[in-house]
Amino acid sequence: MWDVPKAKMTMNNCVVQWLLVLVILGLAVCCCIGCARKEPVPPCFSLLSGREKEAFFEEMDPASQGLDSWRDLAKPLQRSLNALRFKEKDQRVLDTPQLRLTVRDLRESIRHMLHILPELKADPGLLAREFACYELHPGSLFTGYYQPRIAASLEQTSEYSYPLYALPEDLQSIDLSRFHPRWEGQRLIYRIQDGKIAPYHTRAAIDGQNVLEGKAKTLAWARDVLDVFFLQVQGSGQLELRNKEIVHIGYAGKNGHEYVSLGRVLVERGHMNHEGLSMQSIRAFLDQHPELLPEILFTNPSYVFFRLRSDGPYGAMGQILTPMVSLATDPKMVPLGALLAFEVDLPGEESGTRLTGLGLAQDVGGAIKGRHVDLYCGSGPQAGQIAGRLKSQGRLVLVLSKSVLDAVN
């Protein structure tokens, strides 16, 4: 990394506020022009008929999710319910022509599921009788993520030289919904440079020019730069220190730049083929071509910052995630806290494994947009093998207690 002089910045609060207003107004004009050219594709939910719903639930097997029984879902369900209790019950979380939901609807569905969990083994038909199902069409792309474990040190050495940064002191953000409802759930991430608003530093500036010196605390130092990159992609993980102590590290924020897939870049540049593309194959290629590392890594301007934790991993709801149950979704399409059912083929050495079960929308991701969902696969090498190779079309269904059906129609 190269050293650059630290910029000395001063700012007047009033000037900054006016600059923010001007930026937002500019975004509004651009957004309106963009909307005139291209309309977003709306979600499409369809209510499953009684027979379709029965057939879907009949295929479910808690063992395919690594659960001994449906009772094992009690803790993750309760975690989602705990998070939803802090939200306004009448807050609209989904508003489509086919389906409208509030926080109250999500809470009631989870409570109902918790109530019937002890009876499902003896009477699995309860699911079809007690719940309504809305399937997301025309299908969902399932990918996977996991909790990696990387070698790290709390002190910088010649062997451990790649920093894991905390949230920088000069990183600023603002809730855009304060300016217009169309930006509900969106934030502007920026910095102040010479009294003016500027985009936050890119990956190339952070890792290539050392621009965070004196602006961000270094939590730990990693041995491998690719470990750091893939830890950022996953959003959380475990640090194995030199004394073999394990420390949890979790997501604290990001720099606001759009995520760019390294796999797509490597294919577009002719280095790799789509066939067999996975996290493992990408890593193997870059390990074999270290001369390409900076150039390829810098094509992804997105950068993630961390915090040390006592346990984990935590999702966007502030709750611990459950392997093969927790899903990262686009909240505009599938709201956080939603009770789900899903079906997807997991990668395997030969024919693969069909995963059919109940899930929870408990996380989000920079690359998770639209009908794309990300399944949390757990921690360790086996979870990494599944997560790195999972890229399959599957079925995703919103599961709602019939007691709220009248409210959503």
Image (tube, grey):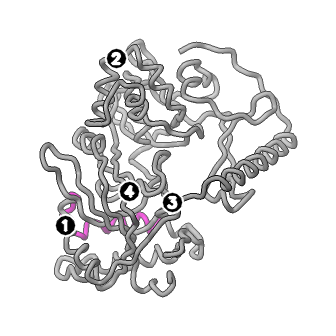
Measure how far apart labels 4 and 3 are at the Cα level.
11 Å
- Residue 24 placed where, x, y %? 76, 48
Q: Secondary structure at mark 1?
A: loop
Q: Are marks 2 and 1 in contact (CB under 8 Å)?
A: no
Measure how far apart labels 2 and 1 are at the Cα level.
43 Å
Task: Say which amino acid is labelled 4.
Answer: Leu
Task: Say which amino acid is labelled 1.
Answer: Asp
Q: Which residue is mark 4?
A: 327
Q: Which residue is mark 1?
A: 61
State whether the magenta stretch is mostly helix, strand or loop.
helix
Measure how far apart labels 1 and 4 are at the Cα level.
18 Å
Q: Nearer the viewer, residue 56 or 124?
A: 56
Crowding near the residue tagged with mark 2, few <14, some 14–19, many ≥20 C-alpha atoms within 10 Å: few
Q: Which mark is residue 331?
A: 3
- Residue 160 placed where, x, y %? 40, 19
Measure how far apart labels 1 and 3 are at the Cα level.
27 Å
Measure how far apart labels 2 and 4 are at the Cα level.
34 Å
Above or below — where is 299 with respect to 332? above
Q: Nearer the viewer, residue 37 or 225?
A: 37
The magenta segment is 65-83
Crowding near the residue tagged with mark 1, few <14, some 14–19, many ≥20 C-alpha atoms within 10 Å: some
Q: Are marks 4 and 3 in contact (CB under 8 Å)?
A: no
Mark in front: 2 vs 4: 2
Ranked by sequence position, the earlier of labels 1 and 4 is 1
Q: Which mark is residue 289?
A: 2
Q: Is residue 97 magenta?
A: no
Is residue 157 shown left or right of residue 217?
left
Q: Is residue 78 magenta?
A: yes
Is residue 103 shown left or right of residue 131?
right
Q: Secondary structure at mark 2?
A: loop
Task: Say which amino acid is labelled 2.
Answer: His
Above or below — where is 167 with respect to 93? above
